[in-house]
Image (cartoon, helix red, strand yellow):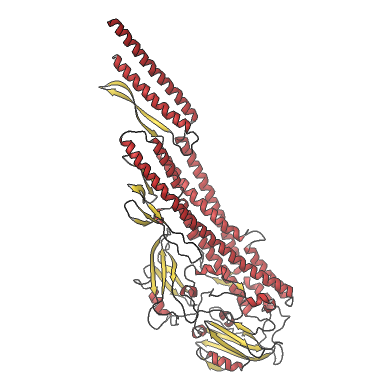
């Protein structure tokens, strides 16, 4: 071997040791830098014509383990998803209070029923009445407050979605910029590990927001895709777009989060994301919170309805001067059709003595009033004639009103043997004549309408539905117009189910025997919501979604109730006395000492009620108290499960990060050993060079 070869080999060793020391020093300097991946110099032996020619520092690379990297990012995405879901769901669960404690919403329901039981024992006590009215209003205020907080959590999630999108877009742009730097450096064999480390830090941050997959590009850099393959960074970068809804309520229809890929293709992002903070926020906003809101709405509505059932079956003493019904959302003709049984409307003086009465016996679409035949078109005229001026009945804007005349009050009582009934409610209850808690729109959706009934909407008015996928993205918006024709529910149902211009491709609407309109999707993962309701029914002024409870309308019921204003002002108007239809002429049919109405209100939570499917729970028949207990358990169980998922995901993320760090992070002991090793190698190469120089000098000296 020539001296020149020795010199060249030693020089290559010197340069390689120098490169190794440079990388080692960089690693040591970044030992505490979060996300830093240690650098490694790949060195290979140099061979020339089959002979060893020293060593080459082939390239500087990151000590990345792509399997641990993928596992770590997946775990981080899952942890972000479950953590944000739990964080916001816990806000909702907290509003209900401890389900097992003596405080909170569910316990307050039982306390309210107990308050009415106490009132029944002393119906003349002003203090007891005042306390009970206060507790009733407080409970419905509490329900409204919880409903508002649920929507507030959804609004927070929606706002955080916008913030997440605004964070992700710069990350994608920076990753793409570093791709260009890495590719350019790789072509000329530059050390690009600094750019790669910076890029990996950005990718780690991106994985917090969505699940991502990384592919190495042949010319350097990476291709970043979503979990299902949408391109985020490749030959350019994608752009995400979203506009938050602003004010959110149960009926809000949210815009899609759209992704425009580098090639210009535009997709709903949610079709490509199954994890990360974005998915967690969507899960909470579109699934977890709406389910809680729907169940709260159903519970509150049935609680109010059962209390109104009891209150309508009784009367205050003295009887109220007028009874003002709810907005039925129907014409009087439709509203009266379908009743059976018998009810009596009486005008009574301040002493509770009957001054005039009209007994109505229903038979489908016809009735008799004090034995006089009538039908829905002649009902008011016949009723007023039979009351003989002691009271009058009017109907306007979907509301029935009874008013005593000449200082009389008005009371309504069903026949004990054959009570009036329509959709499971008596005459006074169905019209809401003596409701304890009131609302401006219908809160039970058993309308009593049949396929032959007039729906009351004008032809050409429209309702826009949104069909959503299981992932939460929009499939299609469908606008259905009210058809021209005779105006029957049958025609409306046909238009709604039309496979071309209606919803027939995605599911079917049906009208049950009680007149409740419902939609059932063909695909269990398909969702339906209301984007816009431009319908107005005559004479009530209600929209179609309000009348039938379509979309998220049912969830709004939790915030819709308040104790009737005149009862709040005067608790003496609580209906605690049962009207005596058998009272002898000239004797009082009502008594102040009668507390049976209080007992009926106390027992309102003990009677079986038909609960509609809501919030992922199927239809069921059970008591209000039992439903409340089930709901309390469900809320608590879901909050506990969310916490467990969050803690488990966090633990897995920490374990994955620990394993990844063990493989990729800087180990100070290892680097110090490397530093010593490369120092010795450097010194050895330097001594070889010195030895070669000495040998050259000796050789030159001999030649002289």
Residue 237, x across and y down, in percent:
36, 49
Residue 629 left/right relative to 268: right
Residue 666 left/right relative to 147: left
For the residue pair 316 and 250, the one nearer the viewer reads as 250
162 up-or-down from 337: above or below:
above
For the residue pair 559 and 595, the one nearer the viewer reads as 559
Q: Residue at x 47, y 31 (%)?
A: 29
Residue 702, x across and y down, in percent:
29, 5
393 up-or-down from 628: above or below:
below
Q: Residue at x 35, y 56 (%)?
A: 266
Q: Quadrant of residue 119?
A: bottom right
Residue 613, x across and y down, in percent:
51, 67
Q: Is residue 293 visible?
A: yes
Residue that protrudes farthest toward the left in the picture: 49
Q: Residue at x 58, y 86 (%)?
A: 342
335 up-or-down from 550: above or below:
below
Image quadrant where one finds the C terminus? top left
Q: How many marks?
A: 0
Image quadrant where one finds the N terminus? top left
Q: Is residue 369 visible?
A: no
For the residue pair 519 and 81, the one nearer the viewer reads as 81
Residue 650 left/right relative to 575: left
Residue 465, x across and y down, in percent:
42, 68
């Amino acid at each position: 071997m020539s001296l020149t070869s020795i010199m060249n080999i030693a020089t290559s060793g010197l340069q390689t040791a120098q490169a190794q020391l440079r990388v080692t020093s960089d690693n040591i300097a970044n030992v505490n830098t979060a996300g830093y991946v240690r650098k490694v110099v790949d060195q290979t032996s140099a061979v020339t014509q089959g002979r060893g020619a020293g060593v080459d520092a082939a390239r500087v690379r990151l000590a990345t383990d792509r399997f641990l990297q993928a596992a770590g990012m997946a775990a981080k995405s899952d942890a972000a998803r479950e953590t944000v879901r739990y964080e916001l769901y816990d806000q909702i669960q907290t509003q209900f209070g401890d389900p097992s404690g003596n405080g909170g919403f569910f316990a307050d329901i039982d306390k309210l029923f107990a308050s009415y039981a106490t009132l029944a024992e002393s119906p003349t006590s002003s203090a007891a009445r005042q306390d009970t009215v206060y507790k009733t209003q407080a409970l419905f205020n509490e329900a409204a407050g919880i409903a508002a907080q649920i929507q507030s959590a959804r609004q927070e999630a929606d706002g955080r979605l916008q913030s997440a999108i605004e964070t992700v877009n710069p990350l994608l742009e920076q990753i793409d910029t570093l791709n260009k730097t890495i590719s350019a450096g790789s072509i000329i064999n530059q050390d690009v590990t600094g750019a790669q480390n910076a890029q990996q830090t950005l990718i780690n941050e991106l994985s917090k927001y969505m699940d991502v997959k990384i592919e190495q590009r042949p010319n350097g850099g990476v291709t970043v895709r979503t979990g299902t393959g949408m391109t985020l960074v490749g030959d350019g970068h994608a752009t995400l777009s979203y506009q938050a809804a602003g004010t959110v309520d149960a009926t809000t229809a949210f815009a899609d989060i759209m992704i425009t890929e580098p090639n210009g293709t535009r997709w709903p992002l949610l079709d490509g994301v199954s994890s990360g903070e974005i998915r967690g926020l969507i899960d909470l906003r579109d699934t977890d919170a709406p389910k809680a809101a729907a169940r709260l709405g159903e519970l509150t509505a049935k609680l109010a309805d059962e209390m109104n059932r009891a209150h309508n079956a009784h009367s205050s003493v003295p009887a109220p001067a007028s009874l003002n019904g709810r907005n039925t959302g129907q014409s009087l003709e439709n509203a009266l059709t379908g009743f059976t049984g018998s009810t009596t409307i009486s005008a009574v003086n301040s002493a509770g003595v009957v001054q005039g009465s009209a007994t109505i016996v229903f038979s489908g679409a016809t009735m008799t009033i004090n034995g006089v035949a009538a039908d829905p078109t002649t009902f008011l005229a016949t009723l007023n004639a039979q009351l003989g001026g002691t009271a009058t009945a009017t109907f306007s804007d979907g509301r029935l009103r009874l008013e005593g005349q000449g200082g009389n009050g008005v009371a309504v009582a069903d026949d004990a043997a054959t009570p009036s009934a329509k959709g499971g409610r008596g005459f006074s209850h169905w019209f809401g004549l003596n409701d304890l808690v009131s609302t401006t729109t219908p809160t039970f959706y058993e309308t009593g309408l049949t396929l032959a009934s007039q729906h009351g909407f004008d032809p050409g008015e429209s309702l826009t539905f949104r069909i959503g996928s299981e992932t939460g993205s929009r499939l299609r918006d469908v606008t259905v117009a009210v058809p021209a024709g005779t105006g029957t529910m049958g025609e409306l149902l046909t238009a709604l189910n039309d496979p071309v211009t209606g919803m027939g491709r995605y599911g079917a609407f049906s009208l049950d025997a009680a007149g409740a309109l419902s939609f059932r999707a063909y695909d269990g993962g398909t969702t339906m919501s209301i984007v816009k309701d431009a319908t107005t029914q005559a004479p009530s002024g209600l929209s179609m979604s309000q009348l039938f409870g379509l979309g998220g309308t049912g969830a709004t019921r939790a915030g819709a109730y308040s104790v009737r204003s005149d009862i709040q002002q005067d608790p003496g108007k609580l209906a605690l006395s049962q009207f005596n239809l058998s009272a002898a002429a000239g004797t009082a049919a009502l008594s102040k000492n009668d507390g049976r109405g209080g007992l009926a209100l106390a027992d309102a939570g003990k009677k079986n009620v038909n609960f509609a499917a809501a919030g992922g729970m199927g239809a069921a028949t059970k008591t209000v108290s039992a439903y409340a207990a089930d709901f309390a358990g469900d809320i608590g169980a879901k909050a506990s499960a969310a916490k467990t998922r969050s803690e488990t995901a966090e633990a897995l993320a920490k374990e994955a990060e620990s394993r990844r760090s063990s493989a990729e992070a800087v180990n100070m002991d290892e680097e110090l050993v490397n530093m010593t090793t490369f120092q010795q190698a450097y010194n050895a190469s330097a001594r070889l060079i010195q030895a070669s120089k000495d040998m050259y000098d000796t050789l030159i000296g001999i030649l002289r």
